[in-house]
Image (cartoon, coloured by chain):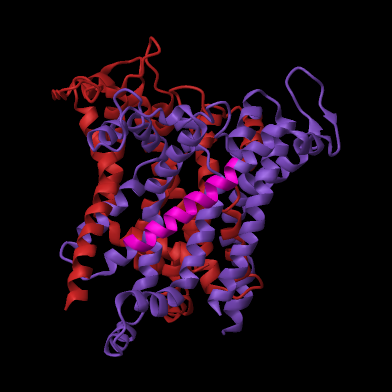
Chain colours: A red, B purple
């Protein structure tokens, strides 16, 4: 079987390329973050010395505010994940359990809305948040994030709710439970894995967001990780690569671990969000 | 359907949907409408607000920097999506093979997806560094290039650098979607074709590609719309440079907001919106066809 052998060879070449392509920049980030001199590739004889100094520096040094950015990102993303999943759950209940005009079209329209470019709202949001006095507060980010994460969250939660047989909650309604009771006593527990993975995806989305955070925050009181790391500059115009890569590694590792740990869910959800439309 | 439940339902429906509508209207639809409205005004710092009608749009049509941004954004979107779909198809085919450690391979592919764009942009910024970046180090060590290349210093270099960084970050997404499409193709089709004596390439063209087409279209449209609004990567990696050559539409609009020219910035944003909007309509249309 010559064809089989060529195919096996090509497959392994492809796999090697694929894994290298995806992981080399990631490992480069970690290697630089652990280096004593981030310019180690410039000398003729590459001399690499390992140190944890960069990590100590960004976790301690007050002027870089990295711990503050991390705290802001974690709090904002967690709150957004929680509220978005809850609001999406309420709406998905109505879309999957009630008959009313638009129950098919509205979710489609909402998905369409999520394709709007963020730039088309950010100027107005800036004025709105200035008017509310929310610039540089958590609120300035939490509210828009929830709105922008809702479309995808709605589609994913909806697909999980559709899989729960209607007889289950109808029986509870006949027994005299209220709509809201059926939702949180029957549907939510049954769809718990789905709700959890939705929250995870929304968390990653919020942690990633850049444009709103850039426009609506001004300093470490509310600034998030991506903007903080993007604006990291050295004191004398020299870019502190060791510190930047250490901060990047600390911020990325939890996301990578979550993604790898829950990859089955994430793959399912991403596919649902994209293909059900 | 029980009549009683239905009657009681009318109010309940709106109650359950109300938070969704409030968020979507308050922080997406209203701001979009506000941006349209603002684009009709002179709205800059230190001058009274003044209604201009379509004057901002006329300025837009005559603005060479706007056209340069539009051209860059479209070129970038089509270039990156083409590469991502090509590479994503290959990765998906590889991951669809029965291989040992398949779960781990899939996990490796997801790593770039998990890292925030702003962070990966900084990593790429270091990779492209002229003096001590990984790109020049590897190219020289492998003998591909005799001297270091100034990646971010020339228009084409910056364009290619952005393209590669974007392909790295978003190919995982395309791969995952296409993998789902591949897994939906029944194995018997391939078995039958093998019995008929076709080779791998023929099977790909005759079976895989036609059956994967709906999923491919979805992935292409999703990614195109996303690529058209690119901001983070450009902002961090090239700052729109050199000389404004890689300024995307979103970044161009942002620069006017930054200098408090909300009227013209809004007009740029509306242009960006209209491009993405026409594509989302297209997407929804195709989505409906796919559902039938």
Magenta residues, start to end: B72-91
**In the image, is residue A158 above or below residue B266?**
below
Residue at figure coordinates x 36%, y 35% from the top left = B124
Observer able to see residue A250: no
Observer able to see residue A19: yes
> Which one is in front, B231 or A158?
B231
In the displayed structure image, the side of residue B171 where residue A152 appears, left or right: right
Q: Give residue B39's position: percent from left, percent from top.
A: 76, 37
Q: How many marks?
A: 0
> Which one is in front, A189 or A198?
A198
> Which one is in front, B120 or A201?
B120
Q: Quadrant of residue B199?
A: bottom left
Q: Give residue A164's position: percent from left, percent from top.
A: 40, 75
Magenta segment, principal secondary structure? helix
Q: Give residue B79's position: percent from left, percent from top.
A: 50, 50
Q: Quadrant of the N terminus of chain B?
A: bottom right
> Which one is in front, A226 or A192?
A226
Q: Quadrant of residue B63?
A: top right
Q: Give residue A42's position: percent from left, percent from top.
A: 25, 22
Residue at figure coordinates x 78%, y 35% from the top left = B62
Q: Quadrant of the C terminus of chain B?
A: bottom right
Residue at figure coordinates x 46%, y 37% from the top left = B233
Residue at figure coordinates x 23%, y 64% from the top left = A11
């Amino acid at each position: 079987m010559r064809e089989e052998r060529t195919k096996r060879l090509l497959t392994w070449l492809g796999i090697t390329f694929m894994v290298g392509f995806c992981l080399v920049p990631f490992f480069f980030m970690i290697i630089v973050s652990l280096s004593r001199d981030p310019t180690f590739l410039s000398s003729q004889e590459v001399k690499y010395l390992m140190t944890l100094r960069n990590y100590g520096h960004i976790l301690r040094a007050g002027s870089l505010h990295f711990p503050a950015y991390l705290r802001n990102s974690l709090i904002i993303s967690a709150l957004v994940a929680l509220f978005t999943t809850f609001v999406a759950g309420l709406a998905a209940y109505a879309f999957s359990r009630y008959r009313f005009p638009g129950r098919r079209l509205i979710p489609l329209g909402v998905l369409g809305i999520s394709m709007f470019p963020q730039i088309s709202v950010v100027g107005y949001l800036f004025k709105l948040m200035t008017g509310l006095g929310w610039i540089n507060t958590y609120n300035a980010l939490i509210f828009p994030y929830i709105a922008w994460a809702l479309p995808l969250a709605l589609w994913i939660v909806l697909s999980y709710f559709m899989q729960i047989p209607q007889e289950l909650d109808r029986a509870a309604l006949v027994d005299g439970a209220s709509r809201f009771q059926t939702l949180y006593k029957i549907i939510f527990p049954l769809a718990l894995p789905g709700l959890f993975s939705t929250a995870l995806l929304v968390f990653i989305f919020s942690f990633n967001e850049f444009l709103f955070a850039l426009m609506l925050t001004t300093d470490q009181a509310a600034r998030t990780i991506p903007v903080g790391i993007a604006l990291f500059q050295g004191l004398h115009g020299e870019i502190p690569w060791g510190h930047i890569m250490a901060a990047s590694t600390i911020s990325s590792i939890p996301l990578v671990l979550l993604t790898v740990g829950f990859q089955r869910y994430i793959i399912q959800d991403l596919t649902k969000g994209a293909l059900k439309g | 359907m029980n009549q009683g439940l239905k009657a009681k339902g009318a109010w309940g429906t709106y109650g359950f949907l109300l938070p969704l509508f409030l968020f979507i209207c308050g922080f997406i639809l209203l701001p979009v409408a506000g941006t349209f409205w603002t684009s009709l005004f002179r709205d800059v710092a230190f001058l009274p607000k003044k209604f201009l009608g379509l004057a901002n749009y006329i300025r837009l049509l005559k603005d060479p920097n706007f056209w340069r941004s539009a051209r860059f954004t479209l070129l970038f979107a089509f270039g990156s999506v083409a590469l991502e779909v090509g590479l994503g198809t290959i990765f998906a085919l590889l991951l669809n093979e029965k291989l040992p450690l398949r779960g781990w391979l899939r996990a490796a592919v997801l790593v770039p997806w998990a890292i925030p764009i702003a962070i990966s942009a900084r990593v790429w910024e270091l990779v492209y560094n002229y003096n001590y970046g990984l790109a020049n180090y590897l190219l020289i060590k492998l003998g591909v290039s005799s001297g270091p290349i100034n990646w971010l210093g020339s228009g084409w270099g910056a364009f290619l650098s952005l393209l590669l960084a974007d392909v790295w970050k978003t190919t995982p997404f395309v791969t995952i979607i296409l993998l789902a499409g591949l897994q939906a193709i029944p194995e018997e089709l391939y078995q039958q074709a093998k019995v008929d004596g076709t080779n791998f390439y023929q099977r790909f063209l005759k079976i895989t590609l036609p059956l994967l087409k709906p999923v491919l279209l979805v992935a292409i449209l999703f990614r195109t719309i996303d690529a058209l609004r690119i901001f983070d990567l450009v902002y961090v990696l090239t700052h729109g440079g050199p000389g404004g050559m890689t300024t995307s539409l979103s970044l161009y609009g942002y620069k006017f907001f930054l200098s408090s020219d909300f009227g013209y910035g809004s007009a740029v944003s509306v242009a960006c919106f209209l491009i993405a909007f026409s594509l989302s309509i297209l997407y929804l249309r195709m989505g409906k066809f796919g559902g039938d």
